[in-house]
Amino acid sequence: MRSKTIKHVCLSAAAMMIAGQAQAATWETSADIRERYQTFNNYNFNSAVDNDRQELDTRLYIKAKGDLGNGLSVFLQSQAVYIKNHTVTTGTQELTQADLLQAYLQYDIGDFGARLGRQQLVYGDQRLLGHLGWKDVARTFDGVKLMYKSGPIKLDAFAVHPSDIGAMTPSTAAPQGESLVTWEDRSLIGAYGTYTFAPKVGVDTYFINWNHTQQAAIGKGRNMNTFGARLFGKANGFDGTAEAAFQTGTWANNVSQKASAYAVKAGYTFDFWKTRFGVEYDYSPGDDKANVTTHKSFVFPFHTNHAHYGEMDFFSWANMKDINLSLKTSPVKGLTIIGNVHFLSLAEAKGDWLNVVGAGNVFAGAPGYTQTKAGTEVDMKVVYKVEAIKGLKLVGMYGVFNPGAAVAERNGGKADLAKFGYVLANYKF
């Protein structure tokens, strides 16, 4: 109740400040609509049990940015979402929703700035903090962010909690169009800094405290610190990043947290068709569950993992090894072809195989498991920016996951091929 009262006071104060300046404001507006059809085939790796799913979704963004003068500005981003989802088990379900994805007031003076309200946090490769724009209802936060930027130095400090709009499930039953998770009992307080040595070359460092109160639905008493660094560079056709993240603190009441995760990627882009060849290795030790008072799986569910460990979303940055070979080329203007091959395995056979969010299991771990080969995922994507219609982008993607021995061991001997595909049209105007 106290947090809600504070939020209402802050929003009321912001509204009064905006109202006093609105008549003199200079406004810029834009819109973004996305139509997408997805199909999920055999995601249980068992062709004898039909769990196929098809989904048609529409998302509309309307953005407005107002310059109120004297360093004061406001940004509003509304969204409307419609999802039609079908499976054999549940039949056809629908969800409709309209709300504010972002709504913040910002004040800038010299090298400093402050942002108050609903806002997205996007940093680095989004392995920890990202907008999750792939989903219909993207991730956003309520809170405050302080910003500093001078020359090669950039530093943000923030205190936020995830907005309640962030977890939605299509359903014909109540609470249709409402969040199924209450996030106000969970908070993030942290800082993210960047030092740029040369153009497109630098280092990020960060520290983030993730806290749950005793009223949180899960993870009561969670008080974890995530900290690390990310090197990045791009020059003369070469590009690369290297990141290491560590976690300490308390996972839940009477359970400590000790985990880490690592990522290295590099590529080279040729002049011919702007063709890039890349290689990436991602790794995070798992939890063998030998000590029930220590949790050793790396978990931080505020990322955009969809871009990293396979578009079929069978993995997060936890208890995993991923060797990714990639190719990206543009044979004609506006057309880009992207291919990725992921060789995926578990770092710890006894540990949980965590899903893309990192908050649930594809398969729970067990002491008797010995197999670590998860499988191979092949993704092919075609992106076309329509020259005749400015702002229109068409995308088609198809992925196949060929499961390995770790799936068969955990799935009653079943290890059938899984498939995923989508087509989408995105128009910005």
Image: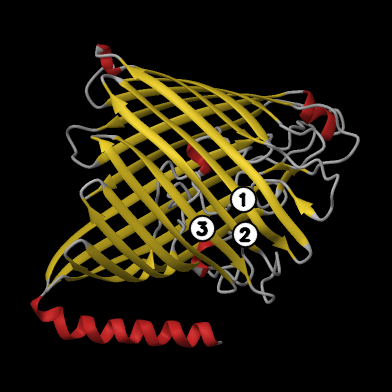
Instruction: Write down the residue under mark 1.
Output: 247
The residue lying toward the viewer, choosing from 88 and 151, is 151
Residue at the far top in the pictured view = 272
Please report the residue visible at 72 percent of the width from the left and 39 percent of the height from the top: 286
Mark 2 and mark 3 lie on one chain; the one further toward the N terminus is: 3
Taking the image as drawn, is residue 421 in sight? yes
Q: Determine whether the residue tagged by mark 2 lies in a helix, strand or loop.
A: strand
Which amino acid type is shown beneath numbered disc 1? Gln
Please report the residue visible at 73 percent of the width from the left and 50 percent of the height from the top: 89
Please report the residue visible at 31 percent of the width from the left and 28 percent of the height from the top: 234
Which amino acid type is shown beneath numbered disc 3? Ile
Mark 3 and mark 1 lie on one chain; the one further toward the N terminus is: 3
Which amino acid type is shown beneath numbered disc 2? Met
**Is 77 located above or below residue 274 in the figure?**
below
Instruction: Write down the residue under mark 2.
Output: 224
- Residue 295 as seen in the image, left or right of residue 201: right
Q: Determine whether the residue tagged by mark 3 lies in a helix, strand or loop.
A: strand
Q: How is the image coloured?
A: secondary structure
**Is 216 located above or below residue 332 in the figure?**
below
- Residue 61 as seen in the image, left or right of residue 187: left
CA separation in Å, label 1 and label 2:
7 Å
Give residue 131's position: percent from left, percent from top: 43, 52
**Is 138 located above or below residue 244 in the figure?**
below
Q: Determine whether the residue tagged by mark 1 lies in a helix, strand or loop.
A: strand
Taking the image as drawn, is residue 69 in sight? no
Give residue 19's position: percent from left, percent from top: 20, 84
Could you classify mark 1 by the number of other residues whose Cα lies within 10 Å: few (under 14), some (14-19), or many (20 or more)?
A: many
Give residue 105's position: percent from left, percent from top: 27, 72
Q: Dividing the image into 4 quarters, which one contains the N terminus?
A: bottom right
- Residue 20 as seen in the image, left or right of residue 9: left
Instruction: Write down the residue under mark 3.
Output: 208
